[in-house]
Amino acid sequence: MDWFRWWHGTVTDPKFQWVSRRSGQPLPTVIAVWAALLECGSNATQCNADATRGNVASFECNDYDVLFGLDDGCVQKVWDAMVEKKLIVDGRIAGWENRQPKREDSGNPSTGALSSTERSRLHRERKKHGETIGDDMQRDATQCNDREEEIREQINHSNTDVLLVASPADDLSSQRLKSPKAVCPHQEIIALYHELLPASPMIRDWTAARAEHLRCRWNEDPKRQTLEWWRRFFGYIGKSEFLTGRATSGDRKPFTPGLDWICKAENFAKIREGRFHDAEAA
């Protein structure tokens, strides 16, 4: 057995802070001694064929004073405090069997644990399988890039006023398989946004994250799944002096949110609730 478990939370465990205070040694020294004890317990059978893992009777405190560059007797004080705290009982690390179960012994035939050779073989197989998946993902990425280039070319021909960098998240209904759910027409909605909110920031890069926000708002309510609804919605935003940059406050720059800000769930809800309007909610 050439390894042992190290549990999360060990460094911040209050037991070791108590040992530090009791022994008068810094916490880093206590943690270092504990790690050395775990190694000693893990290698107990190599030092003594009659011993069992978890036995630390062979641990020499004076040797570790030298190894860690400590004054003589420092490690002994840590040991004594750990014995008092019952972290070490009768020359063994208390609770070793619970925290370092035998089922993880290398090649233990009684528990079905794998030997190091078997674990290496499984690791190679998983790695090979991962490479196969990686090849498939690369092919998908290549196809996705080809489609993105095709969409970009279409947009450049159809819209000379606005530069849009389409993402794979962009939904063009004519190029997707038919689905029972209405497909969000991203480009048409973006065009309405530019038409009805000309003072708002121009969309130049419609990323996957931005597309996801718009798609979620579209899918949340069947009533929103028409371009006419979005035309009315943008028209409603256009009536807000705050959202269109017409409201000024001292030297502060006017606020003109982009479509990505508008489509985020919390902002979208506030707009529909009339938080930025003097009139009734949308």
Image: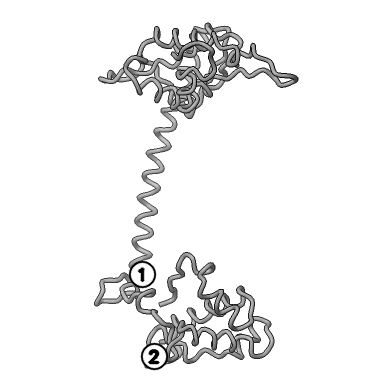
The nearer-to-camera label among 1 and 2 is 2
Q: Which residue is mark 1?
A: 117
Q: Is 161 situated left or right of 143 in this image?
A: right
Q: Secondary structure at mark 2?
A: loop
Camera-nearest residue between 221 and 195: 221
**209 vs 39: above or below:** above
Of the pair 232 and 114, the residue shown nearer to us: 232
The answer to which of 34 and 267 lies nearer the viewer is 267
The quarter of the picture where residue 269 lies is top left
Residue at 44% from the left image edge and 17% from the top image edge: 186
Q: Quadrant of residue 50?
A: bottom left
* Residue 33 in the image: above or below residue 173: below
Question: Dot 1, crowdedness within 10 Å: few (<14), some or many (≥20)?
Answer: few
The quadrant of the picture occupied by the N terminus is bottom left
The location of residue 156, given as percent across then percent down, is: 53, 11
Count neighbours of disc 2 (C-alpha within 10 A) and say few if under 14, some if 14 to 19, many if 20 or more. some
Q: Quadrant of the C terminus?
A: top left
Query: Picture coordinates of residue 107 (x, y %)?
Result: 31, 74
Residue in the foreground of this view, choosing between 86 and 128: 86
Give the percent coordinates (x, y) of residue 108.
29, 76
- Residue visible at 70% across and 18% down in the picture: 249
In the rendered image, the vertical position of residue 58 relative to residue 174, given as above or below: below
Residue receiving disc 2: 51
The amino acid on which the numbered mark 2 sits, given as a three-letter code, is: Ala
Q: Can residue 150 be seen?
A: no
Helix, strand, or loop for circle 1? helix
Q: CA distance from mark 1 to mark 2?
A: 25 Å
- Residue 117 found in image quarter: bottom left
